[in-house]
Image (cartoon, rainbow, N blue to C red):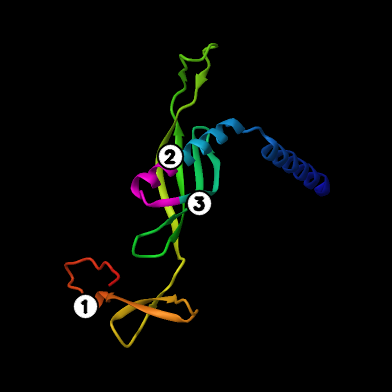
Amino acid sequence: MKKLLSFVIFAALLIWTWKVVHRESNLGFETHAGIQAQLEQIIQAAVMAKRPSATEFKMQKLWTEPMTNNKVKAHFSYSFQESDTLQAPVEQTIEGEAVLYREAPQANPSAEDGNLTDSWVLQSVKTTRDSVVFSEGTLLDSKTSESSTSTPDAAGTQTDEATTPSTSETPATESPTPTTE
């Protein structure tokens, strides 16, 4: 009797997990693809608006997952190059996530058949990690309060160019901004 009961419970759990794994999502592939395409455009426009000197924008990863029937979480990772006239280009990589919720479907007046359109509202955006990669390093000397950028000269040897003093000599009211002399 015990074996029969164990078999029935096992079979019921097996059927239940099969149905959970193979059930159809309420959000279709087209919905996810549309959200991802528009989110990429929004992120790129925001980066270019806040950082006009940014170049080589790349969306490295972007995927969405449903949280509920009316909520989607999007995970993203993008990078861009930013160069200053005084420094070598710097590559920034930023990762984050966004939560979108679906507004009530509205009739689309431009559609011939009167289809309802989904409208998704960007509820929150949170960056979780960012990293900066310098294409040319800065040499810090512990004996002096000056930093220098090491660059090869025509003969291939390293030469140092001195820059402004470190932040320890800067008054607390000013924000330290290194400049090349």
Sequence-first tag of 1 and 2: 2
Magenta segment:
43-55
Q: Nearer the viewer, residue 32 or 169?
A: 169
Q: Amino acid at mark 3?
A: Ser
Sequence-first tag of 3 and 2: 2
Residue farthest along the bottom direction in this orientation = 143
What residue is rendered at 59% in x and 31% in y? 30
Q: Is residue 71 in view? A: yes
Q: Is residue 120 magenta?
A: no
Quadrant of residue 146 within the rendered picture: bottom left
Mark 1 and mark 3: Cα distance apart in space: 37 Å
Q: Residues within 10 Å of mark 3 (few under 14, many from 20)?
A: some
Q: Which residue is tagged 2?
A: 42
Q: Is residue 2 above or below residue 163?
A: above
Sequence-first tag of 1 and 3: 3
Residue 166 coordinates in the image, percent (x, y): 27, 76
Q: Which residue is tagged 1?
A: 169
Q: Amino acid at mark 2?
A: Ile
